[in-house]
Image (spheres, grey):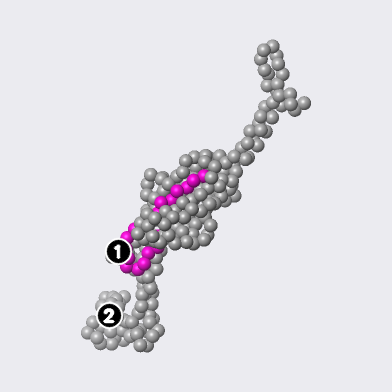
Amino acid sequence: MFFHFFRTHGHSAVHTPRMSAGFALLFALLLSTLPLNARLMLRHGDQVLSPADTVRITVVEQRTEYPSDDPANPDPFTVVDFKYPDLASYTVGTDESLNAPLDFSALVENVSDFSLQWCGLTHECNFLSDRGDHETRNARLTAEKPRLPLELEGHFEANRYGHAVARLTLTPTAPAEASTTYVVRFTYAAPSALPRIATPLPADAVLYDLTGRRVVRPLPGHIYLRAGRKFVAE
């Protein structure tokens, strides 16, 4: 019978093969219902980030110049965009594979005077506009989806430079480990240190030399003006 896990021999218990199989089955059932290795962490790609270190993300200002189509104002105009290199590769997950779903909460707190925009985990965007603003979101990790995108940005305005700082706390719903807290710092530096990308003006824009005379055929190496911009002919 399956219930005969052991038989006595003198004063000692002798394990039978059925006993070993029964314990193995019971252990497997327990494993299938408990999340193992449930330590939550932040990753950048495949790199595990340490809570002891500040996560530093540089915000790149991109100024794109476009030609004007307004006859009353022919000067080109500039559009300022903000880029977050590699931001999409930041994910929340665990240090090892999961044997069962893991429910957890993620708390984002704004600890600076710049706004944060958080869209992660639930794909619903919300602004944390003031210092002290915070929001907790609940999510689940599974073997099929072991990582979720963080989708957190420092939100800036043109010509307002500084640092947006967030505190991210990850907590398992059924605590297998203590909460893990990260500091994420977004830096928007002054434009002198940033590349500027310009969209070329139309090739038929009128060309002038530095004395203001119209030029039909530019000479290589000479400086000319086109739509108010200097450039060196090649």
Kindly give the residue lying farthest to the top in the view shown.
Answer: 10
Given residues 138 and 93, the one toward you in this image is 138
Magenta span includes 90? no
Disc 1 secondary structure class: loop
Which numbered marker is on residue 132? Answer: none
Given residues 68 and 208, the one toward you in this image is 68
Disc 2 secondary structure class: strand
Q: Is residue 75 above or below residue 133?
A: below
Given residues 3 and 200, the one toward you in this image is 3
Residue 136: x, y in percent? 48, 53
Instruction: Tell me the residue that label 2 is attached to.
Output: 224
Residue drawn at (50%, 42%), measured in percent from left and top? 39
Residue drawn at (35%, 79%), measured in percent from left and top? 76
Q: Is residue 43 above or below residue 58?
A: above
Residue drawn at (37%, 46%), measured in percent from left and top? 53
Calculate the distance from the C-alpha at mark 2 to the C-alpha at mark 1.
29 Å
Task: Name the side, left or right, on which 11 lies relative to 150.
Answer: right
Task: Name the side, left or right, on which 189 lies relative to 97.
Answer: left
**What secondary structure is the magenta-colored segment mainly?**
strand
Q: How many marks?
A: 2
Q: Quadrant of the C terminus?
A: bottom left
Q: Is residue 49 visible?
A: no
The magenta-colored residue range is 154-172
Magenta span includes 166? yes
- The amino acid type found where label 1 is placed reads Ala
Kindly give the residue lying farthest to the right in the view shown.
Answer: 1
Instruction: Tell me the residue that label 1 is attached to.
Output: 190
Q: Is residue 193 visible?
A: yes
